[in-house]
Image (spheres, rainbow, N blue to C red):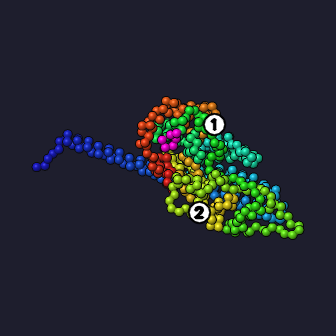
Amino acid sequence: MPRFTSRAERGQAVVLLLGFLAALAALVLWIGTAYRHADARLALRDGGDAAALAAARWQAAGLNLVGELNLIQAYMLADAAPNADAAQALHGLRRRVALAVPFLALLSASETARANGLPEIPECADFLREIGDEAAFNGLFPGAEEAFRDMARTLAARPLHAAPASPGADPSGHLLLAQDFYEAVLADDWCWFWFHAHPFLQRFSGRADFGPLPDYATEPFLGLRLGERLTSLEDLLARGAPLDAQLGALGHPTLPPPAHGPAADNAERRLTVPWSAYDENAWGPWRAMRPGNLPIDGTLRDKYDYFGASAPLSVADGAFVWLAVAKPFGEVGGANPTAHGLVLGGFGDVRLIPVDAGDVGLVAFNPAWLRHIRRHLPGYAATGLTFPGCRYCAALRTFSNPAWRARGLAWLARFGHTCRRPKTGGGGDAGGAHYGH
């Protein structure tokens, strides 16, 4: 016989159906939110990588232009015509190029990020205005500070969708410039001290133990990282620098030979003048710059085996941040373009590189950290002054507390042997996985 459901049973079925539909709606909403988050992260990664590559192309163009100006100087000094004054002026022009390239690179990166639909980073403009106001260049060229300030203010007046990465650690190992140190203090991460600063924690008695702060670059973002070499064209040729071979490899005619005869005057070939060269502290073999901590397997070809002119860029979209690093590569006659120290150009390629393999330790753009190391640390190093509202200053006050250090040392004495080094890799919300590129 057919069974008739009661009104109460029909009501229960409706309740169950509504519950099922509510759960289904929640699942669909969750899937949609997860998809949007995943899509946002992918867009952020793609836009950030493209921004870093765009900046690196300007780094390459700047290096090539400086190299061409070096070569023009060689031709001028080799020529019989009196070109000494013009040759001397070329170095000022090379310095202007090196000063301007970071701004052009950042502008290109910002426009690339904008074209990829990434939002503006308002704090970047504030940062540019700050470093513009603080610019100080000793003897770079007359008016260098004003030129730098004008470029910084001009760029800060427009929406910026990419920001230069912040330095995460000082290559010299100074604790006050190592962001990991502050984070370890704030988190009571005693294991960090076990591996990185246990003896310092034991002997610390006051801020003087940190030692003097190293010089901090006025221009801490991007940059060609060039120096200069004072020598003559004659010395360059006599020391075995194969300029003629390199000129041929770059598609240029060879240098004219020295003039001969009683009336010959080759004084300009012997004139000591400045040439743009690779800064030996910022350019060099990868393994020499990152001993024991380089994420490279296999054989590294000589023409790619050099640091320098990295373009670390940070982009953000809400809570998601992505850090990417790219750098220019090239060759001169199939060889490493930095082999002889003199900048001659030849950079025709840009590649993404691992974040860990950048020129300095890097973190995503962090205005609070930059403000601390640029504005707060000099006062702390001189007088012990700390600033309210600064989490890094709060970490310094905590570290200076003898009771806090005693608690950490007691914990390490009992449990330090159980500490394990964290594995590298991954990225999380901060983006830019350690070995992501």
**In the image, residue 121 above or below residue 331:** above
Please state the horizontal and vertical placement of residue 175, each as a whole percent of the image: 56, 41
Q: Find the residue positioned furthest to the right.
A: 262
Amino acid under disc 2: Asp
Q: Specify the label residue 285 is tagged with.
A: none
Q: Write down the residue under mark 1.
A: 378
Read off the magenta span.
194-199
Please state the horizontal and vertical placement of residue 186, each as a whole percent of the image: 49, 36
Please state the horizontal and vertical placement of residue 371, each as a whole percent of the image: 60, 39
SS of the residue under disc 2? helix
Amino acid under disc 1: Pro
Residue 76 visible (yes or no): no
Query: Residue at point 29% right, 45% down?
Result: 20
Neighbour tally class for label 1: few under 14, some 14-19, many 20 plus, Cα within 10 Å: some
Q: Is residue 198 magenta?
A: yes
Residue 208 visible (yes or no): yes
> In the rendered structure, which disc, 2 or 1, sits on the residue that comes first in sequence?
2
Neighbour tally class for label 2: few under 14, some 14-19, many 20 plus, Cα within 10 Å: some
Which SS type dominates the magenta stretch?
helix
| Left or right of 74 on screen, residue 50 | left
Q: Are marks 2 and 1 in contact (CB under 8 Å)?
A: no
Query: Residue 218 falls in which quadrant of the image?
Result: top right
Foreground: 212 or 37?
212
Foreground: 281 or 161?
281
Please state the horizontal and vertical placement of residue 21, each as a whole percent of the image: 31, 46
| Left or right of 318 on screen, residue 17 | left
Q: Specify the label residue 302 is tagged with.
A: 2
Query: Residue at point 52% right, 52% down?
Result: 293
